[in-house]
Structure formats: structure tokens, C-alpha cells
Image (spheres, rainbow, N blue to C red):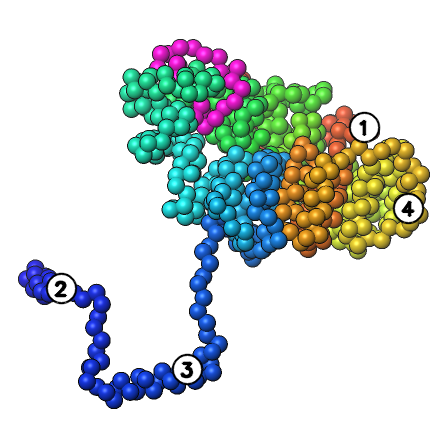
């Protein structure tokens, strides 16, 4: 202690000079002359002429990104040659949600890539804000928040507070959300968004009177949000409300429902925003069917991983009668049917039986437009089945599952099975081989020596002339991947094609996409690709996809164009269209292992439920 006091005394004995005086004595004329001489030598030194001092340009705040060049990010010059206002306009109108894995990957990478922007702007943070809001509306709230954290604090001026509040509410962190609400309110902000959340925060702390005052004000400012006012009445006055009539469900609505401790009714998730799907899939106050529906949709949009859906499927219990029913009659449409099939597939040890169950699940998934989700959750079971001649009928389904999940090596084994001469006598296997051959030509041109002219003839014959559109698109894709198409093949198609092409994107998009390609505007071309293909629903539009594949290839985005091409070709596979496979004959081959779902079902509850 004494030492501390002494040291402190010395430290504060006299004021410290912030500008240290020169140690050179004024009367030292020799030293001064040396300095002068050294300055003359420095001016004459030719090396010094190479050194220049320039003022660094400030970093544009909208150039920041989580994905870096060399990693998941695109090149840092993807916005080169593009007009900033055009980029901002495109980002604001591209779709929020993508069922296509290849498009979703493009979307996340373009939104999250760090890239330089040359154009100046009166609002330099606007593009970053658009990217963040777009990601949040897609359900990628955590990624949006991570990107928002890169924004300069002085420039953002609270523009991402709303995102912070919604993220915390979705995570169940009401305290942090309300702290930010109070902070914003204390700074004089009073938007309807803020006031709605303020009213809920007042309810959380028991200040009902203040909450009523805020709600009365909101009746004048934002009378259209009927869901909010209904939920507020439940929380404050205990009134009963039919939630099934809700046309939208926001993070605020979900937080209010949780606070009221009421169950979310079935069917409410059909029109909810992607941002709340993850919370619904994990919420304890949702019904089994709601959790399944929300989780399946969230997986299909890439918001949660398939392992979350697997966990939900695994925790459902079924009675014995329900398990047995799956082997009788046609496919049934209960919401938990795919969960039951998932459990049975996991327990089967006989490959033929496992394949039957997986194929039945695939048929149901295609009927519900969720094939990729089904493949994702069952991929481990698919990987446990090895190709053999008795399973050649299953090859198409196995190949589709493996390719959608980027298991190209495993898919190649199945294709070699159906491409062998011994299996081509079966018309069903021949059809699968013809439909899938173009994909494997793109992956490995040496895998098959099929003559393209013969392929076209066989495709026309086996499909009764109904596949001209598919053949045209396929040939266009193959030509892009260096397969030379003889003129006589095109002439043959011209003679068989008696209808106009019904696939088209708005001409404005096509023209500007082609201009972006010609101008080497990489980022802009990707945005136009998302705009044209992302609006075509759950499947990629083949004709537009062909244009996109050709355009991206010109920009040397080979891997990206290849994935889109393969996904387009996979869209032609649909087990629901295979009408000549006799599943009833093979139904008897399904055998249960000692640990199968049939044996376990004897001890299960009569009704399906979740183990909370």
C-alpha cells in the first residue's frame, strides 16, 4: 500500500506534457546542419520517388458480408459494372422463399457475400438494410442479425432495432426484447411496431393500465391489425378469440399467444410468414399436426435442418393397428403418415422391405409437393441400401434422393446398375435409365456411350411423343455442357413439335438478364436468375432454367449452373407418373425386424402424441 501511494504521488507530481518537447538542443548547430544535409539526400534518393501518400476511400457500409471470397462468398467484385439503384431494386423484389436447394444456396450467398460497391449513395447503408430485411423475411433471422452486427454503429441509427426485438421474441428472450423497446421509446420513437411491443412489455410486468393506454392509441394509429387487438383482449380481459381465423401470424402475435398460454389451432400455419415457422415447429403450445406441418415446411425452405424434423418424427408413438394399417390399401393422408413411414424404414433390416417403405413415403411426399424434404429426413435410410438387381425398380427413387442431397458418388452406383445391358429389357428400368442418363452425362461424360440420336428416338417412343418439351430442354442443357447435337436431331424435334412453348419469363427480365451477362455483371445476373426462377413455384421452370444455366456458364459460374441443370433434370422424375409398377405384389415382401415398429407398437399408447 505504501508503495502504491508513493508511486501515485510521483505520477501526479507534475502535469504530463501531451506534446513531448524536442530533445535536440537549439545551440547545436552541427546537428541542425546534419538534419538539413540528410533532408537534401532524401530528396535526391530515387527510391523515395516511388512512395506516394494518398487518402484512403471510406469503406461503403453496404459492402460488408459474412461470407468471404475464397470461402462461401462470391468474388468481391460481383457488383462491378452494375448500377447501385438497379441492385437495390432487384434485391427488394426477388422472392423471399426458395424450395429449390440450388436457388436457395445462390440466394443466401449473394445476400451474405462481402463485395465492393463503387457507386456512391446518399444513403450508403440502404443496400445493406435491404439485404438484412430480405434475409429476415425469408426466415433466416439469425443470419440477418449476424449481418446487421457488421453495420457501422454510427451509420445504422437504430435501423435494425426491429429485427433485434423480433429475434429475441422468437428465441423466448422477452427481457432483452423489452429492454430494447423501452430504450427506443425513451429516445422518442413511437412507431406502431414499437407501440404494439410496448403494450405487450407492459403486460409482462403487470402494468395493465399503461398497456390499455397504448392499445387505445393504436386503435387510432393502426386499426387494421385485428389479430393484435384480439390477442390483447385475451391477455388483459380474458376474452375468448378464435385463432383459426387469423390470416397472418407475426413474431409479436406468437409471443402474445405464448403469454396467454393458449394452444395454436391446426391449420393456422398454412399462411404464416417463414420467420415464425421455426418457432412454431419448436413451440410446446402447438398441436402435433401443427408442429409437423411447420417443421416440414421449414425444412423445405432451408430454415431448419432435417435433423429437427427427424427428432419430431422419432418422438411420435403409434398404436399397433395404426402400424399395421400402413401395409393395407392405398396411401393415406394423415399428417403424421410420413413420420410413421420414417420410423418403420429406420427399423427395417431387409433391404427390399426398407426400399418399399421409403418408396411409399416418397409417393406420399411427391403428392404433397415435399419430395426434397422427405429425401432429406430419410437420407440415412437411403444410404443403408446398396444397389442390387432385385432393387433395380427402386433405382430412380434412390438416385433422386442421393442427388438432391449431393451424394453423387453413391448415386453413380445406382445408375450403373440400371445402365447395365441385363436390366434394360425391363421397360420401367429402361425409362428410368433414359430419364436419368443426361444427369450422369453432365457429372461424368464417360459413364455412358449412348448415342444422342438413339436417346431422342427412345424417349419419343417410350413416352408416346409426350416428352418433346423435356427432350428440347435436356438437349439445350447438354449442349451447354459440351455435348454436340447433330442437326438431324433438331430437325427431328421440329417435325414432332406442333405446339408453342408455354414456358416464358417476363421479357423485361430476360432482356436485362442477357444484358447483365453480356456486361459481365456477375451479381446482377445472379439476382435476375433468382427473380426469373424463384417465382416459378416449388419446381424450377425448365425453359427459364435453360437460359439461366447458359448465362451463368458464360460468367464461369460452372458449379452453380451445373447444380441448377441437375435439379431441372431431376424434376422430370416423378414416381406418381409411374403407373405400371405393381406395388401390391411387393407389399408382401415387407418383413419386420425383431426391433421393428410392429413389435414396439404393443407397448405404445393408443393415440399418437409427442413426448414433451
Question: Between marks 1 and 4, how big is the CA–CA gap?
Answer: 29 Å
407 or 96, nearer to the observer: 96
Q: Position of residue 151 (x, y in %)?
A: 43, 46
Q: Quick check: is 28 in the magenta stretch?
A: no
Determine whether, in the image, residue 596 is placed left or right of residue 488: left
Question: Alpha-carbon distance for marks 1 and 2?
Answer: 94 Å
Residue at the disc numbered 2: 15
Per the image, the residue denoted by label 3 is 43
For the residues labelled 2 and 3, the Cα–Cα distance comes to 39 Å
Question: Picture quarter containing residue 341?
Answer: top right
Residue 579: assigned label: 1
Q: Quadrant of the N terminus?
A: bottom left
Precedes in sequence: disc 4 or disc 2: 2
Distance in Å between CA atoms under marks 3 and 1: 89 Å
From this viewpoint, is residue 214 visible?
Answer: yes
Disc 1 and disc 4 in contact, CB within 8 angstroms: no
- Label drawn at residue 489: 4
Please report whichever mark, 2 or 3, sits nearer to the chain's N-terminal start: 2
Amino acid at each position: 500500500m505504501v508503495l502504491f501511494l508513493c508511486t501515485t504521488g510521483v505520477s501526479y507530481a507534475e502535469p504530463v506534457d501531451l506534446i513531448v518537447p524536442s530533445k535536440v538542443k537549439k545551440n547545436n548547430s552541427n546537428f541542425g546542419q546534419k538534419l538539413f544535409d540528410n533532408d537534401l539526400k532524401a530528396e535526391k534518393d530515387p527510391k523515395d520517388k516511388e512512395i506516394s501518400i494518398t487518402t484512403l476511400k471510406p469503406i461503403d457500409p453496404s459492402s460488408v458480408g459474412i461470407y468471404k471470397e475464397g470461402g462461401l462468398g462470391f468474388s468481391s467484385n460481383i457488383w462491378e459494372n452494375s448500377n447501385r439503384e438497379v441492385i437495390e431494386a432487384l434485391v427488394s423484389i426477388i422472392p423471399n422463399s426458395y424450395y429449390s436447394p440450388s436457388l436457395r444456396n445462390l440466394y443466401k450467398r449473394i445476400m451474405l457475400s462481402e463485395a465492393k460497391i463503387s457507386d456512391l449513395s446518399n444513403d450508403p447503408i440502404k443496400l445493406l438494410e435491404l439485404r438484412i430485411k430480405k434475409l429476415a423475411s425469408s426466415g433466416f433471422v439469425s443470419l440477418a442479425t449476424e449481418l446487421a452486427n457488421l453495420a457501422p454503429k454510427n451509420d445504422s441509427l437504430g435501423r435494425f432495432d426491429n429485427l433485434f426485438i423480433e429475434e429475441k421474441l422468437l428465441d423466448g428472450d422477452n427481457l432483452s426484447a423489452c429492454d430494447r423497446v423501452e430504450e427506443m421509446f425513451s429516445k422518442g420513437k413511437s412507431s406502431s411496431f414499437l407501440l404494439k411491443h410496448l403494450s405487450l412489455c407492459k403486460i409482462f410486468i403487470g402494468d395493465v393500465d399503461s398497456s390499455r393506454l397504448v392499445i387505445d392509441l393504436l386503435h387510432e394509429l393502426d386499426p387494421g391489425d385485428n389479430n393484435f387487438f384480439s390477442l390483447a383482449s385475451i391477455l388483459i380481459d380474458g376474452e375468448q378469440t378464435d385463432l383459426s381465423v387469423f390470416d397472418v401470424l407475426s413474431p409479436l402475435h406468437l409471443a402474445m399467444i405464448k403469454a396467454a398460454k393458449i394452444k395454436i389451432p391446426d391449420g393456422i400455419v398454412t399462411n404464416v410468414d417463414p420467420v415464425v415457422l421455426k418457432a412454431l415447429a419448436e413451440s410446446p403450445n402447438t398441436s402435433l399436426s401443427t408442429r409437423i406441418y411447420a417443421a416440414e415446411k421449414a425444412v423445405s425452405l432451408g430454415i431448419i435442418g432435417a435433423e429437427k424434423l427427424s427428432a419430431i418424427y422419432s418422438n411420435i408413438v403409434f398404436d399397433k393397428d395404426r402400424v399395421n394399417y400402413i401395409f393395407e390399401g392405398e396411401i393415406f393422408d394423415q399428417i403424421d403418415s410420413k413420420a410413421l413411414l420414417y420410423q418403420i424404414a429406420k427399423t427395417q433390416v431387409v433391404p427390399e422391405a426398407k426400399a418399399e417403405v421409403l418408396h411409399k413415403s416418397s409417393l406420399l411426399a411427391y403428392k404433397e409437393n415435399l419430395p426434397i424434404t422427405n429425401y432429406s429426413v430419410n437420407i440415412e435410410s437411403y444410404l443403408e441400401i446398396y444397389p442390387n438387381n432385385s432393387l433395380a425398380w427402386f433405382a430412380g427413387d434412390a438416385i433422386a434422393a442421393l442427388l438432391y442431397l449431393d451424394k453423387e458418388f453413391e448415386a453413380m452406383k445406382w445408375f450403373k446398375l440400371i445402365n447395365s445391358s441385363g436390366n434394360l429389357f425391363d421397360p420401367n428400368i429402361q425409362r428410368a435409365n433414359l430419364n436419368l442418363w443426361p444427369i450422369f452425362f453432365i457429372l461424368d461424360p464417360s459413364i455412358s456411350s449412348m448415342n444422342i440420336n438413339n436417346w431422342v428416338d427412345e424417349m419419343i417412343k417410350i413416352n408416346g411423343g409426350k416428352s418433346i418439351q423435356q427432350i428440347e430442354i435436356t438437349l439445350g442443357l447438354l449442349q451447354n455442357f459440351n455435348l454436340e447435337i447433330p442437326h438431324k436431331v433438331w430437325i427431328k424435334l421440329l417435325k414432332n413439335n406442333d405446339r408453342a412453348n408455354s414456358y416464358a419469363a417476363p421479357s423485361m427480365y430476360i432482356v436485362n438478364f442477357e444484358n447483365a451477362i453480356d456486361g459481365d455483371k456477375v451479381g446482377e445476373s445472379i439476382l435476375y436468375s433468382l427473380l426469373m426462377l424463384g417465382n416459378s413455384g416449388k419446381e424450377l421452370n425448365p425453359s427459364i432454367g435453360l437460359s439461366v444455366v447458359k448465362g451463368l456458364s458464360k460468367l464461369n459460374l460452372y458449379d452453380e449452373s451445373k447444380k441448377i441443370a441437375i435439379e431441372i433434370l431431376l424434376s422430370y422424375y416423378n414416381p406418381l407418373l409411374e403407373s405400371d409398377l405393381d406395388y401390391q405384389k411387393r407389399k408382401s415382401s415387407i418383413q419386420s425386424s425383431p426391433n421393428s415398429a410392429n413389435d414396439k407398437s404393443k407397448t405404445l399408447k393408443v393415440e399418437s402424441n409427442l413426448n414433451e
